[in-house]
Amino acid sequence: MALETSQPSQPKQWDERLRAGGYKVTPQRQLVLEAIGRLDHATPEKILAEVQQTARGVNLSTIYRALDVLDEVGLVTHHHLNDGAPTYHLASEGGHVHLVCQDCGSVSQVRPEAIKPLITALDQEQGFETDVAHLTVFGRCSRCRGK
């Protein structure tokens, strides 16, 4: 059950969220949001490369500062999908479970309903409430399994 990628929020909504959080709307923050919307599950380095397509003068520390602000105001969210840098995506995508291939590193996602039996079993057997917004499942994608 694949999750369709939702469209990023309108820039006006981004601006309102930043201002409501007490932050200014800057070109760098806009560029980072747009890059994340295009890339989906991107590391800061990938975001930098995408932003530099438009704005060459932006550096990695600017990307990290923008990501911190955008995460704080709830426009983006980050996950640690491997031992490397965190991966960011738009918060408007909603909750989903990340599926990370240990062979090729691809990241896909499914809706939380796909693992409802697991969530129910953990609750009933362990009294454990699962936070699927931070759930990552590692394994092998269909492409790598077919090799």
Image: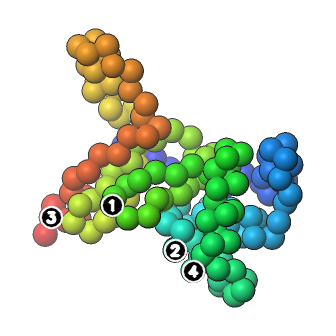
66 or 94: nearer the viewer: 66
Give the secondary structure at mark 1.
Answer: loop
Query: Is 8 located above or below residue 26 in the figure?
Result: above
- Tell me the number on the disc at residue 49: 4
Q: Are marks 2 and 4 in contact (CB under 8 Å)?
A: yes
Residue for badge 3:
146
Query: CA separation, marks 1 and 4?
Result: 21 Å
- Tell me the number on the disc at residue 45: 2
Answer with mark 1 or mark 2, whichever residue precedes in sequence.
2
Q: Residue 39: percent from the left, percent from the top? A: 54, 67
- Answer with the quarter of the image where residue 106 lies: bottom left
Answer with mark 1 or mark 3, whichever residue precedes in sequence.
1
- Going by the image, does 3 lie left or right of 146? right
Answer with mark 1 or mark 4, whichever residue precedes in sequence.
4
Query: CA separation, marks 1 and 3?
Result: 25 Å
Residue for badge 1:
83
100 or 66: nearer the viewer: 66
Amino acid beneath label 3: Gly
Q: Residue at x 43, y 31 (%)?
A: 131
